[in-house]
Image (cartoon, rainbow, N blue to C red):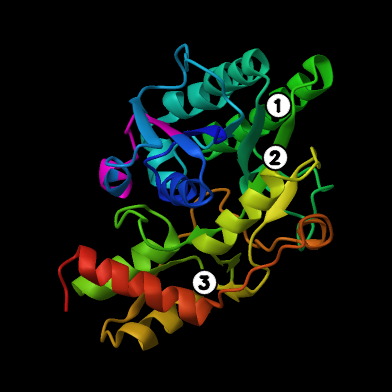
Amino acid sequence: MSKRILITGAAGFIGSHLCDRFIKEDFEVIGMDNLITGDLKNIEHLFPLKNFSFYHQDVSKFIHIPGKLDYILNFASPASPVDYVKWPIQTLKVGSLGTHNCLGLAKAKGARILLASTSEVYGDPLVHPQPEEYWGNVNPIGPRSMYDEAKRFQEAITMAYHNAHGVETRIVRIFNTYGPRMRLNDGRVLPNHFFQAITGEDITVFGDGKQTRSFCYVSDLVDGIYRLLMSDYHLPVNCGNPDEITILQFAEEIIKLTGTKQKIVFHDLPKDDPKQRKPDITKARNILGWEPKIGREEGVKITYDYFKKALNVK
């Protein structure tokens, strides 16, 4: 019998790519999403398959999955600043009640569960690059707190279920990830810059553009998540690409790639926006044998082609 896996947030950007990967690995995949930020178009190609099923459900409410369940990937949450500012209560509820429900299901089924955490648990970091041992610099009542603190709580309750109930848990801390199926109005830097370049708007850079990010292509991230789920390591592991770049440099790369004639315009930096973001992936290398393979030039070109197609631009 094939292994059964529940993927919450299945219609989202990363969740849909995870559905593809586990279908490819011959799992029976159960997708779940309430579609607040997810899109059924991301997984509609899976609907005809016998080993895929979909539940339109909010994980903040009671979850019931009949039959055996071997694994759970908990990826249900708004994930961009635009989304969690729009849905602050829902973001906190999915991080708390939703995670509690997923962990309860894992306990009841004897399933291994992997939590999608985030580099946002490090806040505006005072340590660079960020190792898993760093506790972070997070404003608990700031404009990003509904997401940051939800994720920090998720990690805490996941470890509590591991220590108190012996649930097999895994925690991945995801750094900036990009690729096809990102939403054009996502609010994050890469889709924003592409959308502006393609539609003829000026390219927006916040602050002086010297803040840094590290962009990981989605197939690399998915491979890291797969390896972590199948490992025997239960503490948090960073997954991201340590190739660091300033936001201004990235905007210039987008202009060069797209050939746009627009100029770069500078706006005030949002409150609590991280100044630096670069993962220390020593653990992922040593424990999982994982590191990114897709360079930014290759990955950005693929993503640009996806956005052009989505906007019907030749």
Segment tinted magenta in the rendering = 30-43
Q: Position of residue 168 (x, y in %)?
A: 74, 28
- Is any part of residue 124 visible from this angle? no
Nearer the observer: mark 1 or 3; the answer is: 1
Residue ID for mark 1: 158
Is disc 2 surrounded by few (<14), some (14 to 19) or many (20+) residues within 10 Å? many
Q: Which mark is residue 171?
A: 2
Q: Position of residue 54 (x, y in %)?
A: 35, 30
Residue at 61 percent of width and 29 percent of height: 70
Q: Nearer the viewer, residue 222 or 194?
A: 222
Amino acid carrying label 3: it is: Ile
Tell me the CA gap for discs 1 and 2: 8 Å
- 104 in relation to 198, above or below: above
Amino acid carrying label 2: it is: Ile
Residue at 71 percent of width and 60 percent of height: 279
Tell me the CA gap for discs 2 and 3: 28 Å
**Tag 1 and tag 2, C-beta contact below 8 Å:** yes
Amino acid carrying label 1: it is: Thr
Is disc 1 surrounded by few (<14), some (14 to 19) or many (20+) residues within 10 Å? many
Tell me the SS state at disc 2.
Answer: strand
Q: Quadrant of the N terminus?
A: top right
Counting residues from the N terminus, which is met first, the one under dot 2 or under dot 3? Answer: 2
Question: Does the stretch in magenta take in 33?
Answer: yes
Q: Position of residue 21 (x, y in %)?
A: 50, 52
Residue ID for mark 3: 247
Q: Nearer the viewer, residue 121 or 289?
A: 289
Question: Does the stretch in magenta take in 303?
Answer: no
